[in-house]
Image (cartoon, coloured by chain):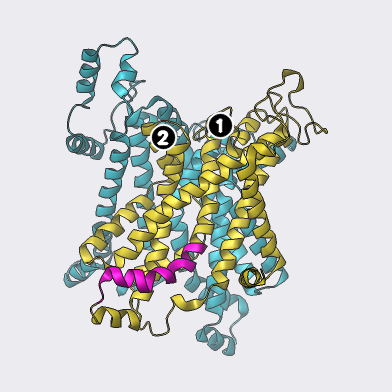
Chain colours: A yellow, B cyan
Amino acid sequence: MTALLKPLRRLLPSVYLRVAAAVVAFMFAVALLGGLIAPQNPLAQNAAETFAGSSWAHPLGTDFLGRDTFSRLITGARPSLLSALVAVAIGLVGGAIPGMASVFLGRRAEYLVMRVVDAFMTIPPIIFAIAIIAGFGNGLTPAVVAIGILLVPRFFRVIRADTLKLASAQYVEAALLFGASKAYVLRRHIWRKVIPTLAVTSSSALGASVLGISSLAFLGLGEQPPAASWGAMLANDLQYLYQEPWAAIWPGLAIAVTVWALNALSDAVHTARPREVEPADAVEPLRAEDAAAAERASVPQYV
Amino acid sequence: MAAIALASRERRISAPLRWLGAEIVRFVPVALLSTIIVFGITALAPANVAATIAGETATPAQIAAINHQLGLDRSVPAQYASWLWKALHGNLGVSYFTRIPVLTSIEQAFPVDLSIVLGATLIAVITGFAGGLIAAVRPNGLVDRLITGLASIALALPEFWFGILLTIFLAVKLRLFPASGYVTTSMSLEGWARHIVLPSVTLAAPVAAVVARQLRISVIKELEENYVTGVVVRGFSRRRILFKHVLRNSAAPTVATIGLYVPSLLGGAVIAEIVFALPGLGQLALNAAQAHDIPVIQGVLLVTIAVVLLSNLAVDALLGWLRPGVRRS
């Protein structure tokens, strides 16, 4: 147990970061348990009790159909958070593998892959998701896939920047000179060393993904009513802002706290990770555009 | 890179023209690929437009006739070529359902987004630069921690929630600004300004946070440079060092970051439009998405991508001016 706690302590040196880790763990536990811990049926309507204030039966009151806000908040965690996880997985696989491979692909393929990523980065994110949904129909799957595709360039650029640095290390050059194949070098020397970067990027990408999925839900894209999700709850609250202005606090707070915690964790891993990734013998200078990409990649982005 | 080398061999061409040439060579493949993506995701989609237009009682022959009329029975590359050719000539097609030319709808909606995106950029640049600079002067001081903390909160706020909170406090409770709607500049300049304040602030918050964080890091790094010690020793005033030397040198990465956020600003504008009920491109695209009105979606995507490419060009020009060394190399 202590062996397990030690790296955790090194990773989370301050109280602030332990709070962030606890928040993330708590939110995802709620998302997993979902309906099991909700005190009431989140879909049960009650026309006699619309816009009710806080009470023992309804700690956070009820919405415009008399549904229990607290229960909807709990069950809304699942479509808001677990689907964000799937989107990150899509972005990771779609971005990290071409990102690593692009360094070893040869000039022409490298040029093409990089221009495709550039092209994806010119498309405004929400409008891209709207277009995907226009073509493939409204639902959670197209929304998650759209957010996943939007995360691809983020993973691609960070992993590529790291791989470029590693590829110029002397032991990699030595391995290539001794006749190791590119695939072998990727597997043996590169893959494990980019994992810390993957962790940092995944954590911040998860924050961006939660924001993105909630934004789409707010626009009515993704999980369809009457199922609860945080973004969709806010869309309803906006319609009844004059009847019940304070209802909008809760789902927004849930999103903001989760995203803040994920960003804080990402920053913490970023500063705590071992600096193997920057080998001292990497004498070959990076190309200016890759240095700039690495510089920018250190700034967290939101979708 | 090869393009720049090629251009610099032509000594007769003036430097700005050479720069523009190199930029165009860099941008054209990206622009072409973006249009392929735009056309691909909308044209390859399974949605059966002709069946929707024809209605439930349509015979297969009627559906085929509509497909032929819309040109949907041709091969995808042929459709793409004719779409791109027309788009380059300013013809974005006609909405499948309202029969309104797409360009007309976009011309009406676009000024709304342009207003709030420009407003947001202005707010983000002013508050972000001010915040980043103030924070960097005394790293880890109280003010720095306050600004860094505020920035990390602003980055976690969902735009739509922040917009709703602004509406609750500044529009519903204090009645300082209108809660929703839009007024064109030709109707009333003051009304226009009042209507775009809250959407612009909503949109600006995360970008301001990113600008402040990036500038703070660059300024702290820059202040450790030898030349700063040099000018301090020479007795230059603190203000002069900060604004004349350090700020200019550390502005470049921040400007580059702002350039990266232009697509996000345009995407975020959709959210702001919905929160504040503005009749912009996002509303247009959302309505079109529900109806599978593909030409409208394609038009909106094309116009926003063009805006992103143009602003990238502007950012590159600004970067070249900020660090002449990079431009020359």
Which quarter of the rendered picture does the N terminus of chain A lie within?
A: bottom right
- Report the front residue among B118 and A49: A49
- Report the front residue among B134 and A232: A232
Write the start and end of the magenta stretch as one range. A180-199
Secondary element at tag 2: helix
What residue lies at 58% left-to-right and 41% top-to-bottom? A78
Res. B170 visible in picture:
no
Q: Spatial distance from mark 2 to mark 1, Cα to Cα? A: 21 Å
Q: Is residue A182 magenta?
A: yes
Instruction: Find disc 1 in the rendering and name its residue.
Output: B277
| Closer to the eye: label 2 or 1 | 2
Instruction: Find disc 2 in the rendering and name its residue.
Output: A133
Which chain letter matches label 1? B
- Report the front residue among B286 and A147: A147
Check residue B249 in the rendering and tell me which mark sits there, or answer none. Answer: none
Kindly give the residue lying farthest to the bottom in the view shown.
Answer: B233
Badge 2 amino acid: Ile
Using the rendered view, name the quadrant where residue A130 is placed.
top left
